[in-house]
Amino acid sequence: MPLHPSTPSLAQFLTRQKALGLYRSILRLTRHLDPENKKFIRDWARSDFERYRYEVDSEKISMLISQGVVQLRTLERSVSLSKVGVS
């Protein structure tokens, strides 16, 4: 039985899951930040994800996810350093 034309391929599905996982990780990281920083980071993440929402070039999407992971790791280090400074 053929798939519906709008059904994503397995690769597209997995890429979407990676992107959503990255977005969720960024949001989870902001949980314990002060409200001002929390809003700034969430707004930044949302605007970046919205900007590339309809991107179809798989290579560009992979590159964007890789860049997002690097930014997430940098953000994690900054948040952990700020927690050390507060203690």
Image (spheres, rainbow, N blue to C red):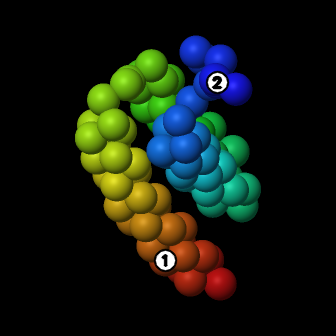
Residue annotated with mark 2:
3
Residue in the image at 60% along x and 76% along y: 83
Which amino acid lies under the numbered mark 2 shown in the image of this protein? Answer: Leu
Residue 36: x and y in percent read 62, 42
Residue in the image at 61% along x and 52% along y: 21
Give the number of the disc on residue 81.
Answer: 1
Alpha carbons under labels 1 and 2: distance apart = 49 Å
Q: Nearer the viewer, residue 68 or 61?
A: 61
Quadrant of the rendered image containing residue 10: top right
Residue 28: x and y in percent read 69, 56
Which amino acid lies under the numbered mark 1 shown in the image of this protein? Answer: Leu
Quadrant of the rendered image containing residue 30: bottom right
Residue in the image at 43% along x and 67% along y: 73
Give the number of the disc on residue 23.
Answer: none
The local crowd at label 2, few if under 14, some if 14 to 19, many if 20 or more residues have their Cα within 10 Å, is few
> Which residue is the extreme one toward the front?
1
Going from N to C along the chain, the mark reached first, 1 or 2, is 2
Side (left or right) of 81 relative to 4? left
Quarter of the image for the N terminus: give it. Answer: top right
Q: Is residue 15 above or below residue 9?
A: below
**Is residue 38 something that shows in the picture?**
yes
**Is residue 41 something that shows in the picture?**
no
Q: Nearer the viewer, residue 64 or 37?
A: 64
The local crowd at label 1, few if under 14, some if 14 to 19, many if 20 or more residues have their Cα within 10 Å, is few
Residue 56: x and y in percent read 37, 25
Q: Is residue 86 above or below residue 38?
A: below
Residue in the image at 50% along x and 68% along y: 76
Check contact, mark 1 vs mark 2: CB within 8 A. Answer: no
Quarter of the image for the C terminus: give it. Answer: bottom right
Residue 62: x and y in percent read 34, 46
Q: Nearer the viewer, residue 17 or 26?
A: 17
Quadrant of the rendered image containing residue 66: bottom left
